[in-house]
Amino acid sequence: MRTAIVGSSVAAIVQLAGFPAMAADTSMIGLEEVVVTAQRREESAQRAAIAITAVTGDALTQSSVTQATDLTRLMPSIQVAPASSLTQIYLRGVGTFAANAFAEQGVAFNVDGVYLSRPAAPAGVFYDLERIEVLKGPQGTLYGRNASGGAVNVITAKPVIGETGGFVHAEFGNYSAVKSSAAINLAVNDHAAFRLSGQYVERDGYFNDGYDDEDSYGLRAQFRLDTERMDFTIMADYAHVGGQGSGGTIMPLLAGKERLGPSDPRVIAEYLTRVPTPPVPQIFARDDGYQDNEFYGVIGTLAADVGFATLTLVPAYRKTDLDFVSYASSFYIDVLEESEQSSLEVRLSNTSDSWNWVAGLYYFDESVTADQFFDQASNGTLIQSNLDTTSYAAFGQITYSITDTFRLTGGMRYTKDAKEQQTYAETRPFTGFVPPGPPDFIPIIAIIPTNALTDIDFTKTTWKLGIELDVAEQSLLYASVATGFKSGILYSATGRNHSDPENLTAYTVGSKNRFLGNTLQLNLEAFYWDYEDQHIAHLGPVQVAETPGGPIFGPVFMTENAGQATIYGLETELLWQPYRDGLLSLNLQYLNTEYDELRYQAYSATGSPPVVGCPVTLTSLNGTTPAARIYEVDCSGRPMVNAPEWTLNAGYEHRIELGGRGRLIIGADTRIESSRYLSTEFLDLGKQKSYTMSNARLTYETESGAFALTAFINNIEDELVFSNSLQSPAKSGTVYNQMRPPRTYGARMSVKF
């Protein structure tokens, strides 16, 4: 269904409420419906008794969304940050600080109903989309795997039967930005169609040394066959992500709002003043960081009418090849990773006057081969892994209408994840200098090998119970209790080398309403989440050797069960069309998070207490060098990371009809966000203060909508907003932060044919 407002970030904010901006007929007033498939069936977003946010593909294009990190500015509940070539997704504080091949997301990322396991998976898919659906809270019944915090569903635009046409989008902006995408839909006959689409993005880096750039392209081909009893689609896609990759800068910033990249001489000079100083071995960033990452995928979707139900089969295959060098976090990261995943989902579903049900089976298999080197000169880690995961699940969900206005929902899923690893690792600590020392400072680097073997199963039954009531013709009241589960994560160690699963139980009460002749939409959602055994990913001590004097512990980026948290809040979505040519949108989230318990261990190569914003206690554990010490950190009572207490997205759009010669569309929007911590170290240097970030645009659109030209400016205030933070493992208290885009501006053209 075509949205009436084209070329607007406000359109994106509007559609967060589940609706396009206005009716396509501009002589009419009223809000349209958006159809979603979040519950494995087509339904209006306004009639779905779940917490969901939907953004259409047109809105994503007009908001210059070309990568997952761009989603943060569109909706208050989500925070997306880069981590070298990986992506970290947080929903209401629930997510994963993904940083290596062992990592798995706490918010599931799905393309056309297929779960993509790798943290790098969101790259290269944000073009020619029908919509994106963000499901808030655990999706333990219909999605299951690694959806403890929610799910991000990317739905590609499908071939349209009986239609030949397409579009071309082109955008040019500062930082030498060129963003283009195109698609063509070809009708083969009355039952078949083919669609080919692609995207090319190139932009200079936001940091002054070239880091934080974009250089990517993608291609997607689809064929669809639709008969009376069957609808079959097969899709193949390829994407390449290049450039220098993400960057970070030393804190506090040395030049105000100038973005000094990690290899800037001023940053390096400042880094070298931090303890330990030379002649202790040093490594610092250069400008030779790069990405050469490739993604391949094939997805088939078959929906067949078998009489009593619809049978859906979704087989899929995905291959990810990562090759990158990064200095974003102040030290050298060199990664080669190859992963292959295959999956199959089989579903039966049916809808009648009284019953709406779905039942299915799920199979997932993944193998990962990774060669990773993390070097801080005075401490290094080499990890070479073969990882395998096999997952099985059986699930079902049913909604029963007790009356015409009152319904009950129940669902359950059984999941078994089998994980194996064969990992060889080396811990390489600096232990001193070759005698006699001065004037020749030849460092001694010890090599401590580790062989980690793991073969373990994780099983869980998750469930959902819900009620929904039609209070009026356009007013829905719903409530639910749902659980989510994320299986344990492996890491390299000779002793314990995996975490236990994490679990989340969510209580939700919501109301979705339309008033004033379909011109006012007001949606409310209150939520309470109980988060147990939370996975905390950080650089911590793991056993790397066994000696007569006891175990030896070395620093490895690990995932452990360190957190118990309580999360509650309220989200309000308001969409108001007071007259035909005006549209106001408000989306406000209040979020209260607190760690009931957060305890983890920190490794100090120098022996000095770790620089954290929480109490620390020295342990008796032995490190890899005589000077090393291991501390217990207690951050209980602190707020969760990437969880601002208040977030407001607001926008207004106005149309000016030009008497048959097209129209002008003027729009502006803003995001106001309170402060939030970026890591579980809870340092002021790793905290983003409250900020306001606004955008504006002016669009001319022809009467038919076939051509549109937009001038835009984003981040008008040129706010410096941090997206991620990491403390140097070698220099305690030295913090590097990554940042969201600065002020950008340019022009965008859209042609439809």
Image: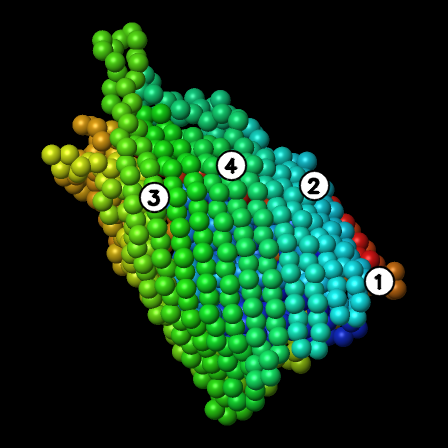
519 is higher (above) or lower (below) than 334: below
408 horizontally vs 312: left or right: left
Residue 632 in the image, given as x and y percentages of width and height: 21, 44
Q: Is residue 700 visible?
A: no
Mark 1 surroundings within 10 Å by alpha-carbon count, few (fewer than 14), some (14 through 19), many (20 or more): some
Check disc 3 and report its element: helix, strand or loop. Answer: strand
674 horizontally vs 163: left or right: left
Q: CA distance from mark 3 to mark 4?
A: 21 Å
- What residue is shown at x 38% (from left), y 41% (from top)? 385
Q: Which quadrant of the view contains residue 432?
A: top left
**In terms of sequence position, does the residue under pointer 4 or pointer 2 come before the other?**
2
Rendered image: mark on residue 703: 1
Check disc 1 and report its element: helix, strand or loop. Answer: loop
Of 485 and 366, nearer the camera is: 366
For badge 2, the amino acid type reads Val
Assess whether mark 1 and mark 2 are in contact (beta carbons under 8 angstroms). no
524 is higher (above) or lower (below) than 248: below
Check disc 4 and report its element: helix, strand or loop. Answer: strand
Residue picked out by circle 2: 178
Q: CA distance from mark 4 to mark 1?
A: 47 Å
Q: CA distance from mark 2 to mark 3?
A: 43 Å
Residue picked out by circle 3: 422
